[in-house]
Image (cartoon, rainbow, N blue to C red):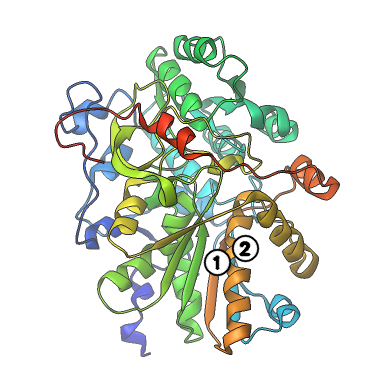
């Protein structure tokens, strides 16, 4: 490959830090469907969203034509603390498996938040500060996003109010305390502090909560506070855009060594980590320049891609957010108290959903105990304790490497190690003690969740 043919030269600086984010929607043949008003079902524009999101983030959300969005200098200066992140060849893992496959992982856990979430948190906090806002509200599942956002808000002097899914709030007290250390106000969700929280508690007494519940509370709180906006850590296209620094750096590193990926694997909850990792490779696959498998891995307990339907749905349990066309289990679906808290969202990003619907990517669901078997195996060999969410990708990467051992094929496997698991020790304890179990929703469970999908002309599923 000659210098002039290397596409990453367009968007990397001399120190290999991305100077632009890449929006895959510009190159998608079928664009994701637009956001709709939850009441009128009409397409939402810039003015319609100004009461919820920051102005610049709305522009990014609505963009479908510009492939490259310049990263402001202030954000790039912050990125320099932890980017570019390393792409690591897993030599020890390859040897232990006895596989001819070459395994690479992009490690996003080398920052204070311990995950990829800081890539978007600092961008959203920057735009909020630039707009002159007082603070932001948000939800968090496992706590990685809340941690990242609290750090970013502290950096820019913004107030940060976090609604943390109740089961994670109880399972991960240290993650909660990191947020509080950075100055965030953290509330277990659903709570008694909002109207929608009180309603959910009345309808589901004793519920462990969900990301959909926490989103509802964060949006309601933002609407009642002057000078605040709602920000989020996954699902929306603006978030996937910021996370493309992961994929752009991965593409750059692979190209330097003339490595062409055969299989790319990422965990999938709302889609931010996966979307950020695969964006440039999905582009090349769409354009016929790359022939590879792109695999989204989700928990069997919350299988939006593998068992959900492709339809317009509410992004939150309280049904107050815009409608998004996505693979969904229904906004009323309350997943089990799965330890991979960041993957407990009822739907999937519109971008990821469309790519899956068009056959650009595929999806697999895996059981929790199988995920932790892979996590433990990886930790013992590669020396990094992975987050439960990231370990879903590890599980499938191991499966594919074992297939290569059986067939003798020397495939190049790349997966996203999106974060560390050092705040997830209760989950590891449950696995080590043999008390961890697998929960797979029944068809009846899914039917109940899907019964609440919005009914209007054109919303077929």
Q: Secondary structure at mark 1?
A: strand
Residue 16 in sight here = no
The numbered disc on residue 137 is: none
Between the residue at mark 1 and the residue at mark 2, the CA separation in whole angstroms equals 7 Å
Q: Can you give x and y, in whole percent of width and height, for residue 20 in the image?
A: 36, 59
Tell me the quadrant of the picture where the N terminus can be found: bottom left
Q: Which mark is residue 415?
A: 1
Q: Quadrant of the C terminus?
A: top left
Quadrant housing residue 182: top right
The 10 Å Cα crowd at callout 2, few under 14, some 14 to 19, many 20 or more, is: many
Q: Residue at x 51, y 65 (%)?
A: 265
- In the visual, does 209 lie left or right of 263? right
Q: Relative to residue 212, is residue 375 drawn left or right?
A: right
For image coordinates 82% across by 44% down, the residue present is: 429
User: Which corner quadrant of the image does residue 169 belong to?
Assistant: top right
Sequence-wise first label, 1 or 2: 2
Residue 326, image x, y percentages: 32, 43
Q: Is residue 164 visible?
A: yes
Tell me if residue 392 comes above or below residue 46 in the rendering.
below
| Quadrant of the rendered image containing residue 104 | bottom right
Say which residue appears at 73% left-offset and 82% top-offset: 95
Classify residue 333 as left or right of residue 369: left
Tell me whether the residue at label 1 lies in contact with that at label 2, contact meaning CB atoms closer than 8 angstroms: yes
Q: Residue furthest right?
A: 433
- Residue at 49%, 51% in the rendered image: 268
Of circles 1 and 2, the one toward us is 2
In the image, 281 versus 317, the foreground residue is 317
Pointer 1 local density, CA inside 10 Å: few below 14, some 14–19, many at least 20? many
What residue sits right under mark 2 in the picture? Answer: 394
| Secondary structure of the residue carrying numbered label 2 | helix
């Amino acid at each position: 490959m000659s210098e002039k043919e290397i596409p990453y030269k367009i968007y990397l600086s001399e120190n290999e830090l991305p100077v632009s984010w890449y929006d895959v929607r510009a190159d998608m043949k079928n664009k994701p469907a637009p956001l709709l008003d939850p009441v009128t079902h009409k397409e939402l524009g810039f003015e319609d969203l100004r009461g919820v999101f920051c102005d610049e983030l709305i522009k990014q959300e609505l963009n479908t034509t510009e492939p490259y969005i310049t990263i402001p200098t202030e954000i790039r200066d912050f990125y320099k603390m932890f980017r570019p992140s390393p792409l690591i060849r897993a030599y020890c893992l390859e040897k232990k498996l006895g596989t001819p496959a070459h395994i690479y992982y992009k490690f996003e856990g080398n920052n204070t938040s311990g995950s990829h979430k800081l890539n978007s948190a600092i961008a959203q906090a920057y735009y909020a500060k630039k707009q002159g806002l007082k603070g932001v509200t948000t939800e968090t599942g496992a706590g990685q996003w809340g941690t990242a956002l609290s750090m970013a808000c502290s950096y820019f002097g913004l107030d940060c109010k976090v609604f943390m899914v109740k089961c994670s709030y109880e399972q991960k007290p240290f993650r909660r305390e990191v947020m509080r250390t950075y100055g965030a106000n953290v509330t277990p969700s659903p709570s008694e502090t909002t109207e929608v929280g009180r309603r959910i508690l009345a309808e589901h007494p004793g519920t462990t909560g969900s990301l959909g519940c926490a989103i509802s509370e964060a949006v309601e709180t933002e609407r009642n506070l002057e000078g605040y906006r709602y920000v989020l850590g996954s699902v929306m296209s603006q978030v996937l855009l910021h996370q493309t620094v992961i994929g752009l750096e991965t593409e750059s590193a692979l190209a330097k060594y003339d490595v062409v990926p055969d299989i790319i694997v990422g965990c999938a909850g709302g889609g931010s980590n996966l979307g950020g990792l695969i964006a440039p490779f999905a582009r090349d696959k769409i354009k016929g320049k790359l022939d590879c498998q792109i695999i989204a891995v989700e928990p069997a307990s919350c299988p939006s891609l593998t068992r959900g339907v492709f339809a317009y749905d509410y992004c939150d349990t309280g049904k107050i957010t815009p409608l998004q066309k996505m693979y969904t289990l229904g906004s009323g679906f309350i997943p089990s108290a799965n330890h991979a808290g960041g993957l407990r969202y009822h739907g999937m990003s519109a971008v990821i959903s469309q790519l899956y619907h068009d056959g650009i990517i595929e999806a697999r669901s895996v059981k929790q105990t199988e995920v932790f078997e892979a996590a433990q195996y990886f930790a013992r060999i590669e020396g990094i304790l992975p987050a439960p969410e990231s370990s879903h990708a590890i599980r499938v990467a191991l499966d594919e490497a074992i297939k290569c051992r059986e067939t003798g094929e020397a495939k190049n496997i790349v997966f996203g190690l999106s974060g560390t698991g050092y705040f997830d020790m209760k989950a590891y304890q449950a696995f080590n003690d043999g008390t961890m179990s697998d929960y797979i929703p029944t068809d009846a469970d899914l039917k109940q969740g899907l019964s609440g999908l919005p009914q209007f002309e054109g919303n077929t599923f």
